[in-house]
Amino acid sequence: MISGQRIYVTGMGAVTALGSGVSALWNGAVSGVSGVRPISFGEKYPTMIKQAAFLERPPKSPGIRPGSPGDVDFVTSIALTAAAEAMSQAKWPTDMPLGNDAAVVIGTGIGAITTIEGEYQKYFSTGDRPDPFTVPKIMPSAPASNISMTYGARGISFALSSACASSSQAMGMALLLIRAGLARRAVVGGTEALLTYSGFRAWEGLRVMTPTLCRPFSKDRNGMVLGEGAAVMLIETEEALAERGGEPLAEIAGFGTTSDAGDMLRPDAQMCARAMSAALVDAGVKPEEIGYLNAHGTGTILNDQTESRAMRDVFGGHLDALPVSSTKPVHGHTLGAAGAIELVITIEALRNSIAPPTLNWISADSNCIADPVPNAARGAAINAAMSNSFAFGGINSSLVIRKV
Amino acid sequence: MTDEPQVELSPEMIEKIMGIVEKEGLVDRAKLTPDATLESLGIKSADMVMILMALEEQFGSYIPIDGPLTEAKTVEDFLRAIAPHIHPKPSAA
């Protein structure tokens, strides 16, 4: 255990429906620009829901030799783009390997569905020649391995999959690995790109998507909106950072995670609250010291009322003064990437002293927090902040960050 | 369910929907009375997803699980919640 050592975020990268880069994401979140837009898979493949915060797939590049390092699924390619931005912001020298004490932990809920769907079509329908490199593309650890190879990170590397908590838990596990002395720095985050026809229809089946607008914590909300994206960060111990002379952006201070051990789809307020409390205890931060909370806030009836109840349990009267918002109407629910994308926003909120708004909010629902920073950003003094991720399967994860 | 327009379903339509609930929800038809609670019928969230999938196939309607349906306690509540989504002339999905 590296006791007392602070662990800093020193670089961040993001790819979302707002565009490539953290600034596109943060500007969208603050100014209330949404990446949600009409989606279609063509006449042959109709859908009931017709919107999502999706990413445009680039046309297949004929220049990439099959099996070469650039021959990856889209879910890996966006993770690599986000990692490059993070390494650049951290001013990590391009020709220097991260080395033996660098870990890579990348969360994903579903993985390489673009390749899986395309290959299934070949096997079961068209009979076209299968891609001989299907396995290295679709293994859930492909994003982590590609990042490890690109930056010469030779410590522990793995994928973490826990549905919508994947990348929040990835951040937390990287924090624990570093504290345990298994690494001094880590490239960590999440990636998700599942808006293919079958991925979209699978989500439609659960009936949790809104046919209108995603409006978290609002009266008359009727579901979530899907998104795609990736966010990756470089995190380092204060000692490792001091040795190379970089600048910290924020401290990753605490992590708490619990399991409902109950229903697959219905969240449990008590266990959500325990995850938040555990993250606060781990960070050594009192509830009233939290100055902004980026909620899981999916816009479903159940999540938002359960999360509201859990936040009341944890924060008591402080909740009425605490800016809480859900930025999912902006970037969509990016599932396995959500924890990392929303942590990027939480860190930018802390650095800029601004609480981004919850879009599309109409009026208060008596079962939810009454003031989720509706529709317009708000200035806020933030010394510490929290980000929540609650997943199907009853997996709850909370992260606490602190100003440097 | 305050802002949902009230839509009356014809007896034939209700019969059709009850058939779907019986089959997809694995419910005894005799117990499907208006005041029976979904809980007493053993209709859980997963059963509701199956029922809504079948309604989509039958009527071409997407019925979100969020909204009035979340609050529905009885068979009558359920019918009232889905009624605005059931079109008299089914359209292809």
Image: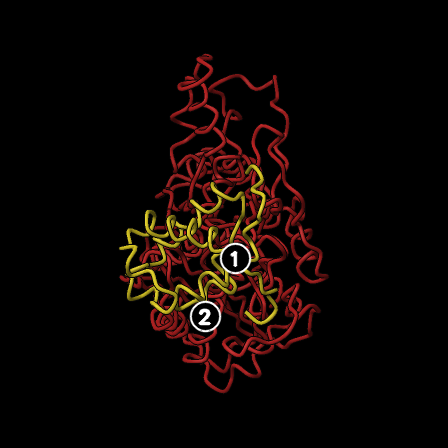
Chain colours: A red, B yellow
Left or right: B27, with A120 as reference point? left
For residue A171, above or below residue A358: above
Q: Give A355 or A238, whichever is nearer the viewer.
A: A355
Instruction: Report which quarter residue A323 is drawn in.
Output: bottom right
Q: Which residue is farthest front?
A: B11
Check the residue under mark 1 and report the chain it is in.
Answer: B
- Residue A107 point in image, percent of width and height: 43, 47
Q: Give A33 or A99, whichever is nearer the viewer.
A: A33
What crowding class fits label 2: few (fewer than 14 Cα within 10 Å), some (14-19), or many (20 or more)?
many
Answer yes or no: is residue A1 visible. yes
Residue visible at 49% across and 87% down?
A: A317
Quarter holding the N terminus of chain B is bottom right
Label 2 and label 1: CA atoms lie apart by 36 Å
Answer yes or no: is residue A11 visible. no
Residue visible at 54% across and 51% down?
A: B86
Instruction: Report which quarter residue A6 is drawn in.
Output: bottom left
- Residue A195 point in image, percent of width and height: 54, 39
Q: Give A114 or A150, whichever is nearer the viewer.
A: A114
Q: Which residue is mark 1?
A: B9
Residues at circles 2 and 1 in contact by the CB criterion of under 8 Å: no
Left or right: A265, with B93 as reference point? left
Residue visible at 46% across and 47% down?
A: B55
Quick check: do tags 2 and 1 share a chain? no
Mark 2: amino acid = Glu
Mark sitting on residue B83: none
Mark sitting on residue A307: 2
Of badges 2 and 1, nearer the viewer stands 1
SS class, disc 1: loop
For residue B46, above or below residue A96: below
For residue A44, above or below residue A334: above
Q: How many labels, in total?
A: 2
Mark 1: amino acid = Leu
